[in-house]
Image (spheres, rainbow, N blue to C red):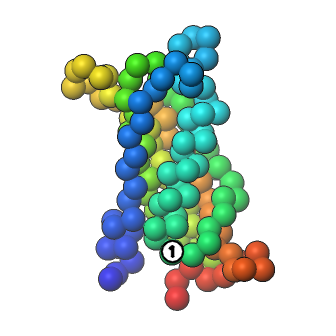
Amino acid sequence: MTIEEKIQACETRIFKAVFPNTTNHYDTLFGGTAMMMMDEVAFITATRFSRQIMVTVSSDRIDFTKPIPAGTIVELIGKVIHIGNTSMKVSVEIYIEQMYSEHREKAVTGEFSFVAIDEYKKPVSIIK
């Protein structure tokens, strides 16, 4: 499998419903909850690509462009965007879908950096 095919194969999509227990007093998803969901999707994406122990080392940039209201469905999409020797970057986008219409729009984008480590917590090569 080529690197490009591997990148395509590890794209990760997760859907979640936004319930009131995850929202703030404005009835929109807590930013920290969105970041937690994004880090989880990024971790799964990185792990599916490398099939190694991966740890988050940074969230490089997260842009909140639309509020995510309670009662909507969100889709999180993780994609590998850069591969180094021991590290990689994963982009995650959150899309809002209305439950009872076809309306869909991008709400949040972010990038996360991961490092592959061994059992001694030392960085190891991603590409074998």
Q: Does the rendering let one see residue 73?
A: yes
The part of the image, by quadrant, that contains residue 16 is: top left
Q: Is residue 85 left or right of residue 78?
A: right
Q: Which residue is mark 1?
A: 50
Q: Residue at x 60, y 39 (%)?
A: 35
> Is residue 44 positioned above or below 13 on the image?
below
Question: In the rendering, at what x and y percent does residue 21 appear?
Answer: 56, 22
- Name the residue at the bottom extreme: 128
> Is residue 11 positioned above or below 59 on the image?
below
> Is residue 57 positioned above or below 103 on the image?
below
Disc 1 residue crowd, few under 14, some 14–19, many 20+, Cα 10 Å: some
- Name the residue at the left extreme: 102
Q: Residue at x 46, y 18 (%)?
A: 70
Q: Secondary structure at mark 1?
A: helix
Q: Is residue 17 left or right of residue 39?
A: left
Question: In the rendering, at what x and y percent does residue 29 appear?
Answer: 54, 24
- Total count of labels: 1
Instruction: Tell me which amino acid carries mark 1.
Output: Ser
> Is residue 94 positioned above or below 128 on the image?
above
The part of the image, by quadrant, that contains residue 61 is: top right
Q: Does the rendering let one see residue 67?
A: no
